[in-house]
Image (cartoon, rainbow, N blue to C red):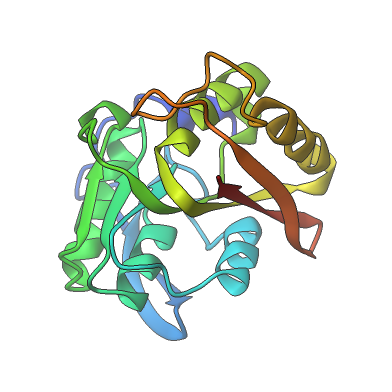
C-alpha cells in the first residue's frame, strides 16, 4: 500500500503548524486544497490505489459509512462530498492522520465526518458501507484482525470496497475472506451474535490494483 515504512500506521503525534503543508488534489471532480504532513500514509499525493478505488465506487448511501485507515482523509472527504447526509466515520490509529482529516473536513465545510480511533466508534453503529485502501504492509495477522473487526458490522446487504495491489496478495485475500466468512466460522459473528456471512468478488482491476467488493449476507 505504501511507499514508506510501516511506522506511519501507528502513533505519530499531530503535526505542528510548521510541519503541515498544503496539497492540491482533485476529489469528486473538484480541485481542492488540503493539509498533509510527514509521518502519515502518502503525504505528498493522492496515491494510485486510492485513485483506483475512487474511480470505481461512488455515491455512498445515507447512513453510517466507514473509511478504514483514513490517512489525511481523501476517501472520507469524497464520501462526504458525494453524500452530505451520510455519517462518515474516518478511522485510523495514527493521531496525526486523524487531526489532518478533521482539519481537511473543516476546511471543505464537511461536517458529516467523525475522525476517530477504532475504539471511539460506538459499539452500536452498524455500517451501510466501507471504503478502504487497507494497510496491507502491517502483515496478514493484523490485516485479518481488522477485517474481522469491521466487516461483521455491515448491515445485511451492506458492502465493503477494498483496493489491494495484485502483487501484494489481492487474490489470496479475496480467497481468505470467502473461506473465512462463509457463515461457519464460530468466532466471526455480527454484533447481534449471528454467524457473519459475506461473499467477496473482484469488482474491478486497474493499474496493478484490484477493487474487491464484499457483500454481507
Q: Quadrant of the C terminus?
A: top right
Q: Quadrant of residue 84?
A: bottom left
| Residue 87 % position (x, y) | 24, 58
Residue 151 x %, y %: 49, 37
Residue pictured at 59% horizontal, 30% vertical: 5
**Residue 5 position (above or below residue 56):** above
Specify whether 119 is left or right of 153: left
Residue 210, image quadrant: bottom right
Q: Is residue 159 above or below residue 144?
A: below
Where residue 177 appears, x then y in whole percent? 68, 34
Whether residue 216 is visible, yes or no, is yes
In the rendered image, which quarter is residue 47 located in? Answer: bottom right
Residue found at x 28% / y 43%: 98
Q: How many numbered badges does the structure rendering display?
A: 0
Residue 193 drawn above or below residue 58: above
In screen coordinates, is 202 left or right of 182?
right
Residue situated in front as seen by the camera: 59 or 185: 185
Q: Position of residue 10 (x, y in %)?
A: 41, 26
Question: Which image quarter holds the N terminus?
Answer: top right
Q: Nearer the viewer, residue 7 or 52?
A: 52
* Residue 71 visible, this angle: no
Amino acid at each position: 500500500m505504501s511507499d514508506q515504512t510501516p511506522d506511519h500506521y501507528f502513533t505519530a503525534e499531530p503535526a505542528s503548524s510548521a510541519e503541515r503543508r498544503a496539497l492540491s488534489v482533485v476529489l469528486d471532480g473538484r480541485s481542492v486544497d488540503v493539509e498533509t504532513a510527514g509521518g502519515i500514509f502518502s503525504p505528498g499525493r493522492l496515491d494510485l490505489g486510492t485513485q483506483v478505488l475512487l474511480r470505481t465506487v461512488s455515491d455512498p448511501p445515507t447512513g453510517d459509512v466507514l473509511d478504514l485507515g483514513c490517512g489525511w482523509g481523501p476517501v472520507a472527504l469524497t464520501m462526504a462530498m458525494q453524500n452530505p447526509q451520510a455519517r462518515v466515520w474516518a478511522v485510523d490509529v495514527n493521531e496525526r492522520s486523524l487531526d489532518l482529516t478533521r482539519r481537511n473536513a473543516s476546511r471543505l465545510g464537511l461536517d458529516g465526518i467523525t475522525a476517530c480511533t477504532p475504539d471511539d466508534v460506538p459499539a452500536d453503529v452498524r455500517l451501510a458501507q466501507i471504503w478502504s485502501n487497507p494497510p496491507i504492509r502491517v502483515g496478514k495477522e493484523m490485516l485479518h484482525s481488522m477485517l474481522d473487526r469491521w466487516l461483521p458490522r455491515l448491515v445485511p446487504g451492506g458492502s465493503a470496497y477494498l483496493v489491494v495491489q495484485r502483487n501484494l496478495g489481492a487474490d489470496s485475500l479475496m480467497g481468505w475472506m470467502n473461506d473465512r466468512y462463509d457463515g461457519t466460522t464460530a468466532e466471526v459473528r455480527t454484533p447481534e451474535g449471528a454467524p457473519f456471512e459475506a461473499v467477496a468478488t473482484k469488482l474491478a482491476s486497474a493499474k496493478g490494483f484490484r477493487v474487491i467488493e464484499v457483500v454481507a449476507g
